[in-house]
Image (cartoon, rainbow, N blue to C red):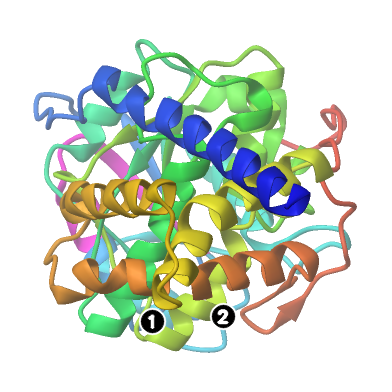
């Protein structure tokens, strides 16, 4: 009885926490709106490793945008035709130097791209990003208020099972951090960012040498935002669904493997917060689903399931073509909780054929490397 009472109290506390986070959605910042009047202010940097099949749609739109002065593709030792495809489209290709010890490939590529860029404003894009007209001008405008702008996209998920699992993972982010675009900035330890699309001014980023300071993190985007927020920068994470689409994964298995690797945020989160985040996910999504399956849900479980269904409706705007997978996503919440736990306890440090040394969990970023070449 005591154990049951303690579990009920813990679930009630987790429900209050989730309710408070979801309530922030009433005071979110508006989504990014297209801005078309900016001319030649932006250098776009795309780190790319074996992306010949996905990079063309990203580069074509960026090269055609009047706000973009140059598009730089940093070819990170690709073994396919990434560099040839990029050059053929008109991008400037930087041949990436060999990866130094202690660096993760993306940060090393971005640091080289930043050094090669000439624009005052830098926008970094992943090769699977699909920018839309007006995105780059909108990012430039947002930098009038913020120091680091990260854009939340609309996702391309074609398969029913793929979309169901993706939406289940996405729901855990909302439960842990609240909706995108919070009106009040979170503490540096809870800042979020999306590395698929970020914008910042070149000179301050060179001075901070931030890519060097987060060089060993697999969760590089969140590590970057938290590092700079701790330095006093003003990062923000804004909804850009009308201006940015991303085609991240091609199958259920790839979502399970890749998002299950990154969403635990294992290498940027301390042990106490990891335990708290997992508790929220288990108590408010997995436990109600498990009790419903066994035919023994409590009234609190039913209330939490109703909230989860309402969130499912709200997440429709996060997908280019929301389908039946979105409605089915709560059925996978138990599996998602298991995957997040696995990714937290046994983080994977392998990506694109490279395996990186283990980083101390929640490790603080390195100080700026003032001796680094510019």
* Residue 352, x across and y down, in percent: 61, 80
Q: Which mark is residue 52?
A: 1
- Examine the rendered structure and indicate whether residue 220 appears above or below residue 21: below
* Residue under the point 27% across and 36% down: 239
- In the image, what residue occupies the spot 13% across and 72% down? 323
Q: Are marks 1 and 2 in contact (CB under 8 Å)?
A: yes
Residue 271 part of the magenta segment? no
Task: In the displayed orientation, state which residue is furthest to the front.
Answer: 1
Relative to 360, is 58 on the left or the right?
A: left
On the image, the x and y values in percent for residue 163 come to: 28, 73
SS at mark 1 in the image: loop
Q: Is residue 7 above or below residue 145?
A: below
Mark 1 is surrounded, within 10 Å at the Cα level, by few (under 14), some (14 to 19) or many (20 or more) other residues, namely: some
Magenta-highlighted residues: 59-74
Residue 241 in the figure: left or right of residue 51: left
Residue under the image location 42 percent in, 61 percent down: 297
Q: Residue, x 15% and y 75% (percent of image)?
A: 324
Relative horizontal placement of residue 179, taking residue 325 as reference (left or right): right
Residue indicated by mark 2: 78
**In this view, 245 is above or below 248:** above
Determine the secondary structure under disc 2: loop
């Amino acid at each position: 009885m005591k154990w049951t009472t303690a579990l009920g109290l813990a679930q009630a506390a987790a429900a209050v926490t989730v309710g408070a986070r979801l309530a922030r959605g009433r005071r979110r910042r508006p989504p990014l709106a297209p801005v078309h009047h900016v001319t030649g202010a932006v250098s776009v940097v795309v780190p790319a490793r074996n992306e010949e099949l996905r990079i063309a749609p990203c580069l074509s739109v960026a090269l055609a945008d009047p706000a973009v002065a140059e598009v730089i593709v940093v070819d990170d030792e690709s073994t396919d035709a990434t560099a040839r495809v990029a050059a053929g489209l008109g991008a400037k290709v930087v041949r990436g130097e060999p990866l130094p010890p202690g660096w993760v490939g993306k940060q090393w590529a971005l640091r080289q791209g930043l050094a090669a860029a000439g624009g005052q404003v830098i926008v970094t894009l992943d090769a699977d990003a699909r920018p839309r007209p007006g995105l780059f001008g909108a990012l430039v405008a947002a930098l009038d208020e913020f120091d680091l702008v990260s854009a939340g996209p609309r996702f391309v998920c074609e398969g029913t099972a793929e979309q169901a699992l993706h939406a289940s993972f996405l729901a855990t982010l909302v439960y842990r951090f609240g909706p995108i675009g919070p009106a009040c900035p979170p503490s540096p330890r809870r800042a979020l960012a999306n590395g698929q699309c970020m914008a910042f001014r070149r000179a301050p980023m060179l001075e901070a040498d931030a890519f060097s300071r987060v060089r060993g993190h697999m969760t590089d985007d969140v590590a970057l935002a938290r590092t700079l927020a701790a330095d006093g920068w003003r990062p923000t994470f804004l909804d850009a669904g009308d201006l940015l689409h991303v085609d991240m994964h091609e199958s259920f298995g790839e979502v399970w493997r890749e998002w299950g690797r990154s969403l635990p945020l294992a290498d940027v989160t301390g042990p106490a917060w990891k335990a708290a985040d997992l508790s929220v996910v288990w108590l408010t999504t997995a436990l109600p689903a498990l009790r419903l399956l066994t035919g023994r849900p409590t009234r609190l479980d039913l209330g939490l399931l109703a909230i989860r269904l309402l969130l499912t409706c709200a997440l429709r705007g996060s997908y280019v073509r929301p389908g039946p997978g979105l409605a089915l996503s709560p059925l996978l919440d138990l599996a998602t909780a298991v995957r997040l736990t696995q990714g937290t306890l046994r983080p994977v440090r392998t990506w694109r054929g490279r395996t990186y040394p283990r980083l101390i969990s929640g490790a603080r970023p390195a100080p700026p490397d003032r001796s680094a070449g510019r």
